[in-house]
Amino acid sequence: MGHFLHAVGVFFHHLAAVKWQFLGYALGCHVLKLFFRAGAWRAIVDAAYPDARLKYRSALGAYVAGVGVNSIVPARGGDVVKLYLVKGKIPGGSYATLAPTLIVETLFDSVTAGIVIAWALASGVLPTHELYSRIPDVDWKFFLRHEHYTLIGLGALLFAAVVLFLVLRRRVARFRERVRRGFTILHDRPRFVRSVIAPQSVSWFLRVASLYFFLEAFGVHASIHNALLALVVDSLATLFPATPGGAGTKQGLTEFLFRGRGESHTLLLAFSVGMNIAITVANVIMGLIAIGLMARTLSFKKLRLRARAEEQPA
């Protein structure tokens, strides 16, 4: 976090050099991207609740609200707000059904992000040994040396699982049916491609365009290659959502991936922090407006308590 605060200071030092026109283009592409992503999520929810006919503006409001909260709350806390807001617009809606829609929404993203990271590895931008060196090893020697206690422990876990299954099998059956409903759109491949993959593909194009304009706005050499490098940074930072908006993580990754490309350390910090601040401010403003209009409150704590209270009877 200390590194991030230092980067913020560097950003404000370079504030006078920002090209505001390109910054506006970047934010415009970012906002437009959210419109397409909200539309894709609405299609997934509509498939799960075909009779509800969720309005686009409701899906957009809930989606933008979730994005806004995720920008300032770590560990995807905005997803709770997103589900709560959209559940209130669906008669008989269930969190068990709505939660899987978020998984479906990320399927294409996961594949696309994987392709981008694979490109970075194949091109040598992201050395494989650097990635593997950060993966923790698992030591299985303890279990092999104490095989007697290991077998007892596994037996106890198996027995507990059987008992739990027998006691809760009816509830599990109902819960499983609700969860399966959230994946309904996957059974209609043409609709999935048309209503989800197509708008998400456009959103990825807008995401790259936004990064390109951010590079231009902060004086870093703007090219498709560098925009893809910034996209790799975003994709990797998303895997470790330990800080709001990836603060700190993105700055370190940006310096690592842009090394040897002739860009100064301070310029890279100004770009990374400036982009992070601009996107966060835009997300928070839109999120607060959406939450205020849909939930009549701006308290994240109240929204979370409401969501839990509604979940109890189900």
Image (cartoon, rainbow, N blue to C red):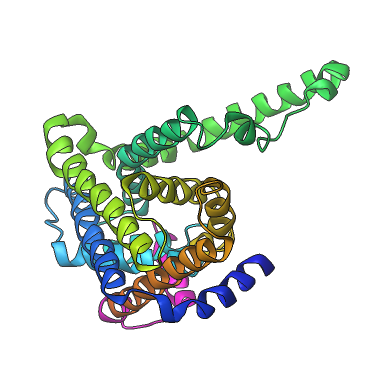
Q: Nearer the viewer, residue 125 or 173?
A: 125
For residue 300: magenta? yes
Q: Is residue 145 left or right of residue 187?
A: right
Left or right: 241 in relation to 97: right
Left or right relative to 146: residue 284: left
Most distant residue in the front direction: 262
- The image position of residue 2, as x and y in percent, is 68, 69
Image quadrant in which you'd find residue 290: bottom left
Point out residue 272 in the picture as x, y percentages from the top left corner.
48, 63
Q: Quarter of the image for the C terminus: give it.
A: bottom left
Q: Is residue 141 visible?
A: yes
Residue located at (16% from left, 42% from top) = 198
Q: Residue at x 39, y 72 (%)?
A: 278
Q: Residue at x 22, y 43 (%)?
A: 201
Residue that lies at the very extreme toward the right in this rendered image: 145
Q: Is residue 91 visible?
A: no
Q: Is residue 56 left or right of residue 74?
A: left
State which region is magenta.
291-314
Residue drawn where x is 51% and y is 46% of the image: 239
Vertical side of 76 occupied by 217: above or below: below
User: Looking at the picture, how far across and down is residue 207, in whole percent?
Assistant: 30, 53
Residue 162 placement: quadrant? top right
Q: Foreground: 21 or 251?
A: 21
Residue 221 is situated, as x and y percent measured from the top left of the image, at 39, 56
Q: Quadrant of the N terminus?
A: bottom right
For the stretch drawn in magenta, the main secondary structure is: helix
Numbered circles on residues, count:
0
Q: Is residue 255 magenta?
A: no
- Image quadrant of residue 303? bottom left
